[in-house]
Image (tube, grey):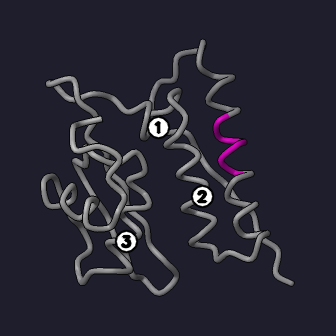
């Protein structure tokens, strides 16, 4: 049996001291989510996706629910994922899904593309059943 480690970080920005405990807890929860996915028989890619989805669900982080807003007050989300064979998928400026990492994985697995952006990424989210909203989040 192969051993593994799950390591995550909550972003590279100047974290407000009032958020340190929440950020640490979010990273610990994400590491546990990734490890649980692998322990349940999932692949390393499943573990990565689970960990990042956990980060995207925590509004104390600059990911998903906690993303910085653009100048129109909307969250435009980006994500990229890569597997051990150098296949990659990414999305940028997505506004209709809470888990851009899952959409990025769909780009990698279900298209010939590496990156979808903006309206094209939003359309793909709808086609893949990952659009939580037709309106910006």
Q: Secondary structure at mark 1?
A: loop
Relative height, residue 14 to residue 110 (above, below): above
Q: Are marks 2 and 3 in contact (CB under 8 Å)?
A: no
Please tell me whether residue 110 is drawn above or below residue 21 in the rendered image: below
Residue at position x 54%, y 52% in the image = 52
Earlier residue among tags 2 and 3: 2
**At 14% from the left edge and 25% from the top edge, which residue is drawn?**
72
Residue, disc 1: 12
Callout 2 environment at 10 Å: few (<14), some (14 to 19), or many (20+)?
many
What numbered label is drawn on residue 95?
Answer: none
Question: Mark 2 — residue?
Answer: 50
Report which residue position mark 3 lands on.
106
User: What's the CA distance linking mark 2 and mark 1?
Assistant: 20 Å
Image coordinates of residue 125 in percent, x first then y, are 28, 60
Point out the image quarter for the C terminus: top left
Q: Which residues are magenta?
A: 26-31
Give the quarter of the image for residue 116.
Answer: bottom left
């Amino acid at each position: 049996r192969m051993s593994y480690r799950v390591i995550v970080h909550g972003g590279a920005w100047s974290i407000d001291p009032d958020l340190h405990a929440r950020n640490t807890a979010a990273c610990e929860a994400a590491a546990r989510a990734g490890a649980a996915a692998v322990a349940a028989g999932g692949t390393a890619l499943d573990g990565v996706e689970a960990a990042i989805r956990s980060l995207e669900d925590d509004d104390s982080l600059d990911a998903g629910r906690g993303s910085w807003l653009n100048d129109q007050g909307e969250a435009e989300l980006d994500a990229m994922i890569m597997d051990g064979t150098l296949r990659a998928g990414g999305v940028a400026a997505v506004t209709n899904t809470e888990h851009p990492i899952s959409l990025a994985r769909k780009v990698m697995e279900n298209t010939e593309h590496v990156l979808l952006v903006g309206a094209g990424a939003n359309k793909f989210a709808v086609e893949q059943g990952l659009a939580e909203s037709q309106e910006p989040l």
